[in-house]
Amino acid sequence: MKAIYPLALVLALPTLLSAATMSNYQHTVMSQGPSAYFKLDGDYNDAVTSGQTLTPYLGYFGTDAARHLTNAYVFNNSSDALALANDIIPGGDPTGTNSSANAVGSISLLFRTLDSNANTGQRFVFSQGVGTTTNGNALALFFEGPTSTNLPNSLKLRVGANTTTILASNLIVADEWYYFAMTYNEARYGAQVIWYLGLAGGTLNSGTNDIGTYSVVGDNGTVVLGNTVNLASGYRDPGNGRVDEFAVWTRELSANEVAAQFAQLYNYLPANVTYQTLITAQNPAYYFKLDNSTADSITGLVLSTNGTAGTFTTNVLGVANSAYQFSQTNDALLITNDIIPGGGTSSSAANGSGTISFLFRALAGTNTTGQRFIFSQGAGTSGNQNQLALFLENTNSLNGDPTSLKLRVGNGPTTTILQSTNIITNAWYYFAMTYDENRDSQSGGEVRYYLGPVGGSLTNGAVDIANTAVIGDNGTVYLGNNNSLKNAYRNPGAGAIDEFAIWNDELSPTEIAAQFAAVTYTVPQPRLQAMLALPNVVLFWATNNADGFVLESTPSLPNSNPVWSSAGSPSVVGAQYFVTNSAAGRTFYRLRKPTP
């Protein structure tokens, strides 16, 4: 998606971020010499001690903080857990307080928060044994239950004889990855525990916990991730909890070492960036920008065309050849590769999750004939419980709401998401859907959808599908049509689609809202200024939003075809770029962002 700008100045786009990875984070943790480190990259093994493995109690491997499949552990039921009978936590005491306790240690991990609905009970991220504050040997990180008289649903750290709230419930960002670390010295007088907490890509906060005189860290019992030792408080509901990168040290990490770990986490919500920059930063598995090309910008896969009338058209910003439109009944873009996560035949074990987002231009008027498909997959049917399509209903629909915009997923029923009378003709719309096939009967439904006219308000809703239903049939994906190739998105007028992206993970509501807000965002252009310092002239401009710009000059601007050349490389002083040139003669200057 490109915008039109004056000849002498091109929009400053931040450098596109490379694909997210956990390798830098893992390297940082390993370089700090942990005594145990469970990366949870598709296995239960300790990366430090050979043969030491976690025991799974249900649960399954899912997407991690870098959106890599099977590289974190997901908890879906009340009894789901990962457990280790070995006491890997330094210090502690099985019988309670200990006047001679003097152990030191550190723990760090990543966890993804639950859905935004209130918890139905305490939800444990990790814990050790059956230690209690009464005995002075507790150890647990958990979300408080809804009936607590002390800050219900908040995130709490329980160590020794005390429990500390480290994040209030109204500050918790749902469905996002957080970093947690704690360091401790049992012999320290007061503030024995120092804790750290931060939203990935955000700010790292810290505080202390006075665990009580002679209290200890843990009871030397079983270490449990995602639950307690009685397997009754699994980290799930609402939604599925995830834990990853659990590491332990026999020393206190310094604040700088903790900060070094946190700094390696990826930021999926960069501020003040264009739509394409934001989508790329959110690490999609596939991203068809449709900027005069049907190639995927991530993998290189290419959409095939069907029909003869489909063509590139202007996008939401009015830039030519930067979206794709459909004019005839058989027009389509399609790919036989199964790029939609999850899906297949109906299955009670379905646990796929994903996100789809794109822009589409409404038709020139109300649909007056048959169904019009904006996108769909395969021949999924309600009988097979594997439907997937967004379409305009036909005029003689027996399903109600003729000519409205509908979403068809799983086993149905088809959901009307925009009545025909509310469709703004020729307007560009943003659409996204996120889903978790394993959410089943939990609050909010397996599928969540978002829809809004560009520049307007974003609305949302949810769809419940059967426990055995899935999203799509793993068949061909169609943009602008369905498998019949007789229901193209056109008439009246030519429908258009743009910026089609897919994730192997369920994006959070915050990430979706950021996408919608970024559709029309334009980065402020740097302003070139000059001042005389005879015999020189000093050119300067703000460093903010000016990455990649070059200063050029020409002596002959009145010429219809002036020749521009480099006017020097800038130096940075404070928040300004500076270039000093001779003031002799007449010279014209400009800032230009070279085309990548």
Image (cartoon, rainbow, N blue to C red):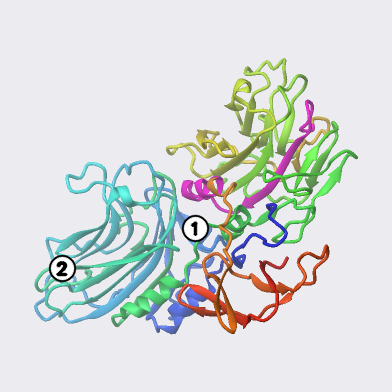
> Percent position (x, y) of residue 540?
55, 73
> Would residue 226 be visible to someone looking at this image?
yes
Q: Residue visible at 83% across and 49% down?
A: 304
Percent from the top left, x then y, of residue 527? 57, 63
Instruction: Tell me what residue is drawn at x 41 percent, y 48 percent.
Output: 77
Which kind of residue does numbered mark 1 sit on? Ala
For disc 1, the marked residue is 271
Q: Residue at x 52, y 50 (%)?
A: 507
On screen, residue 5 above or below 553:
above
Inspect the image, locate mark 2, and give the three-letter code of the amino acid beneath it. Answer: Ile
Residue marked by disc 2 = 211
Quarter of the picture containing the C terminus is bottom right
**Looking at the image, which is closer to me, 337 or 382?**
337
The magenta-colored residue range is: 488-516
Secondary structure state at the residue bearing disc 1 = loop
Q: Residue at x 73, y 27 (%)?
A: 364
The reply, left or right, for residue 311 in relation to residue 20 is right
With 80 as the anchor, is 195 left or right in this view? left
* Mark whose residue sits in front, 1 or 2: 1
